[in-house]
């Protein structure tokens, strides 16, 4: 099978000679091509890549208008002649020597093979603690917001291989930040395999990580939640929760004013009725397509989520009040965090 190595570039001229030499060594015996998609680099990356075409099977695409990493990769997909696409950066932080392992995973049945920093055997070199925190935080946000990728340890990797059919005919968003995450949500595949690798040191050039990059990532996760229907679930869960408030308040009022129950004790059955109301509507509406577990298990787990959320709310409320925050503001923050916790538990466990 022919392999197309797609490399988006911007100001990576100083890395290309070594990169191409190592790719060529890693792919000895393979029918392969290198596709460089360059965003009109001021350092002449595209021009230098063209000069290397005398020695290596290189195709250079110089873009002077549309720019961005994801759109560059998508353009590379369109221009590629291979049966297998390999996507990697040009900064030598993605060691070309790992490519044969990715191809081996594909040949053994995987549709997508990811060079992963976060499976046993993988890692990073000389990252500051805050860089590790940002990376792990981004992955946690993505896996919680998009359950389809929750079992993938490194869904934001920029180094991966896939069969052409995974993305063929798939409408990918060219303004997306992490193209692999987009492929894992929208692509057509059955099996994903993660191959450990060590994320190396940048050889030359500057890192593109910045505040704008992190904001774009959050926007991208939001767009994928909309596309995958997870945002709709969140809205439905919110509406059901509001109906639970009405049920809780209504029955509490009725128990106290009509039945004459104690105000403290009356809150217990009122709360339980609200929980049952919320469970019923979420089971019939919000998560109606995810009833993989028996009814009793879903109901029991829903109660656990409700109790967990209430406990989280109380801890946050008590802590913030202790620190001097206004009790109403503290309670509101506790409610918001509790809501997020309950949604996550129910989406990933109750109806996971």
Image (cartoon, rainbow, N blue to C red):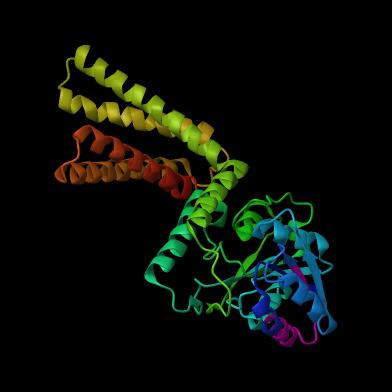
Task: Indicate whether 346 appears above or below 196.
Answer: above
Seen from the viewer's position, the closer of residues 211 and 275 is 211
- Count how many numbered circles sit on residues in the image: 0
Q: Residue at x 31, y 18 (%)?
A: 250
Query: Can you see residue 72?
Result: yes
In which image quadrant can residue 34 be found?
bottom right
Q: Is 24 a magenta residue? A: yes
Q: Position of residue 345 (x, y in %)?
A: 41, 47
Q: Residue furthest top?
A: 258
Q: Residue at x 70, y 62 (%)?
A: 39
Query: Can you see residue 287?
Result: no
Q: Is 14 a magenta residue? A: no
Q: Residue furthest front?
A: 42
Seen from the viewer's position, the closer of residues 72 and 310 is 72
Write down the region rendered in magenta. Answer: 19-36
Task: Indicate whether 157 appears above or below 95.
Answer: above
> Is residue 274 found left or right of 284 in the rendered image?
left
Q: Position of residue 25 (x, y in %)?
A: 73, 88
Q: Quadrant of the N terminus?
A: bottom right
Q: Position of residue 172 (x, y in %)?
A: 70, 51
Q: Position of residue 43 (x, y in %)?
A: 67, 71
Task: Indicate whether 66 appears above or below 37.
Answer: above
In which image quadrant can residue 184 be found?
bottom right
Seen from the viewer's position, the closer of residues 351 and 69 is 69
In which image quadrant can residue 244 be found?
top left
């Amino acid at each position: 099978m022919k392999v197309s190595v797609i490399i988006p570039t911007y100001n990576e001229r100083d890395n290309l000679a070594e990169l191409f030499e190592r790719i060529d060594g890693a792919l000895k015996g393979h029918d392969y091509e290198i596709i460089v998609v360059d965003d009109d680099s001021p350092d002449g990356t595209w021009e230098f890549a063209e000069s290397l075409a005398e020695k290596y099977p290189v195709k250079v695409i110089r873009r002077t208008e549309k720019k961005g990493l994801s759109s560059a990769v998508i353009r590379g997909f369109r221009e590629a002649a291979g049966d297998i696409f390999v996507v990697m950066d040009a900064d030598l932080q993605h060691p070309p020597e790992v490519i044969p392992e990715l191809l081996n995973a594909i040949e053994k049945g995987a549709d997508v093979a990811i060079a992963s920093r976060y499976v046993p055997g993988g890692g990073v070199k000389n990252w500051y603690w805050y860089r590790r925190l940002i990376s792990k935080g981004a992955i946690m946000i993505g896996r919680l917001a998009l359950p389809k990728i929750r079992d993938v340890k490194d869904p934001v990797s920029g180094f991966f291989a896939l069969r052409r059919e995974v993305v063929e005919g798939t409408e990918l968003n060219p303004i997306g930040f992490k193209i692999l995450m987009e492929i894992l949500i929208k692509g057509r595949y059955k099996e994903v395999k993660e191959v450990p690798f060590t994320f190396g040191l940048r050889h030359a050039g500057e890192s593109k990580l910045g505040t704008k990059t992190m904001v774009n990532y959050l926007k991208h996760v939001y767009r994928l939640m909309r596309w995958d229907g997870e945002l709709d679930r969140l809205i439905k869960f919110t509406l059901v929760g509001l109906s639970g408030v009405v049920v809780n308040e209504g029955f509490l009022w009725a128990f106290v004013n009509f039945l004459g129950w104690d105000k403290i004790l009356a809150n217990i059955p009122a709360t339980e009725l609200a929980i049952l109301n919320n469970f019923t509507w979420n089971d019939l509406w919000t998560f109606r397509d995810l009833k993989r577990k028996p009814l009793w298990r879903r109901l029991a787990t829903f109660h656990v989520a409700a109790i967990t959320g209430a406990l989280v709310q109380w801890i946050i409320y008590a802590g913030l009040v202790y620190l001097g925050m206004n009790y109403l503001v503290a309670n509101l923050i506790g409610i918001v965090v509790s809501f997020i916790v309950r949604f996550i538990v129910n989406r990933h466990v109750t109806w996971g």
